Image (tube, coloured by chain):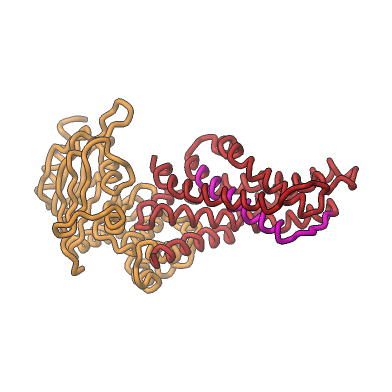
Amino acid sequence: MKDEIRRYLAIVGKDLRVEFRTREILYTTTLFALLLVVIFAFAFLSDQSKSRIYGPGIVWVTVLFATTVGQNRLFDRERENDCLWSLLLSPAAPSTVFLAKATAQVAFALLMQVPTIVLILVFFDLQITDPLSFVASLALGNVALGLIGTLFAAMLMNARMKEVLLPLVTYPVFVPVVIAGVKVTAVAVGAPVVEDVDTWLRFLAGFDMIFGVVTVALFGRMVRA
Amino acid sequence: MNDAPLRLDCEGVARVYGRRHVLRDVSFTAGAGEVVAVVGRNGAGKSTLLSILAGRRQADRGRVVVTEGDRPAGAAKARSWLGFLPHDLLVYPDLSARENLVFTGVLHGQARPVERAVEVLAAVGLTADADRTVRTFSRGMQQRTAIGRLMASGARAWLLDEPSTGLDEFGRRWLLGLLADQGRAGRIVLFSTHHPSEVESAATRVLVLDGGRLVADLPGGAGGASAAFARVDGGRP
């Protein structure tokens, strides 16, 4: 167990080190997210009074699109020199490799989302009235996107059209996460909606648990197939 | 290496790509201390055989068993004992040589990966370039880093696919000495090659593959090398 924790930390540390050295994922996803926010701002700013209604959707659409761009790049550095096999042929358990890659993916996504969400709040003049629920929905939602996205990104690592295929296979699974995220965010920004935040947060936590087990169990078999 | 001796059994391994039989019923056993050269023409199945032995590819038929003493190893244990150097070097180009070796040491559960990396860097002649990213290295230096990866992993069986690729003459001589030393230290070494001189100077045994079949299993040294490459040529152009 102690060895597996060391391996997990080593893989996460390796991914963070390479990313901070190259900044490929952070630059591309952050720039893409900021571009989306600017486009949404031009499209919707004409009626600021409705920003609380469409603001939550903008937050989650931006999170979703930018996260997908990052997930497409996640395994590129493992593909070069066939490095994924240095992990799979090591004594590290496939579940350790998967959880480490998913952790790194979630870390990159959250780093990208901080400036993006600040910009959305400023552009659309949104006030977060329930910060705890908002942060919980982002955390749980990102874990769900990270688990599923990491599994499919690994599977499609060597596919010729992976940039197109990844959203095609992941978005149908992401839809419930985005809906739950939008519902919680709507309440958190004080939108005129009647939603039970606790129910949606429990849904996201349950989603994370189920897909956590499923994706960890499938990773080893799917990448070796 | 005070553990019980390791043995690698390849039992009736076959592999088919589409309709093409790349390996047909390949069986042999390699024991601790053996340095085995695998020779054959292009497409004879050398790389596929090494990939299957390493666990990188699955055999369609047959199996590979790693045994310590008389106990067959589980999957994780076998992975920790086998070190693989394929054509793709399995080193991270955006990490330095030192970072690659420390990372490998941690993955393979080495007790002192940082200190071991320093020793390995000296052994592969990369101490002066230890903190440069591998992407900035020449092909030969990248090959040395990849060989260092095997050393840092502590693997007890080395599987190397044309390991002298990219090395200059000095590097090639160093590599062959290293492989012979690993055999003397009790490791199993299997390497593929197209060069009779490499078989002659490092191998204690030669396996000849032809059309996916193991057609000869000969002793190493000068006599074995010339007999093996005579089989490889087979009178064909």
Image quarter (top left, top right, bottom left or bottom right) of the N terminus of chain A: bottom left
Q: How many marks?
A: 0
Q: Is A118 in front, or is B188?
A: A118
In the image, farthest residue toward the top = B19
Q: Which residue is painted at 33% across and 27% down in the image?
A: B18
Image x and y of residue B67, in percent: 18, 55
Q: Is B49 in front, or is A219?
A: A219
Would you say A178 lies left or right of A102 here?
right
- Above or below, B85 relative to B152: above
Q: Is B151 in front, or is A64?
A: A64
Q: Quadrant of residue B107?
A: bottom left
Q: Which residue is painted at 16% across and 64% down in the image?
A: B4
Q: Which residue is painted at 54% across and 38% down in the image?
A: A162
In this rendering, does residue B169 appear at all?
no
Image x and y of residue B97, in percent: 43, 63
Would you say B236 lies left or right of A101 here?
left
Q: Which residues are magenta?
A: A126-152
Q: Which residue is painted at 26% across and 38% down in the image?
A: B45
Would you say A97 lies left or right of A193 here?
left
Which SS type dominates the magenta stretch? helix
Q: Which chain is red?
A: A
Q: Which chain is orange?
A: B
Q: Quadrant of residue B48?
A: top left
- Above or below, A121 relative to A57: below
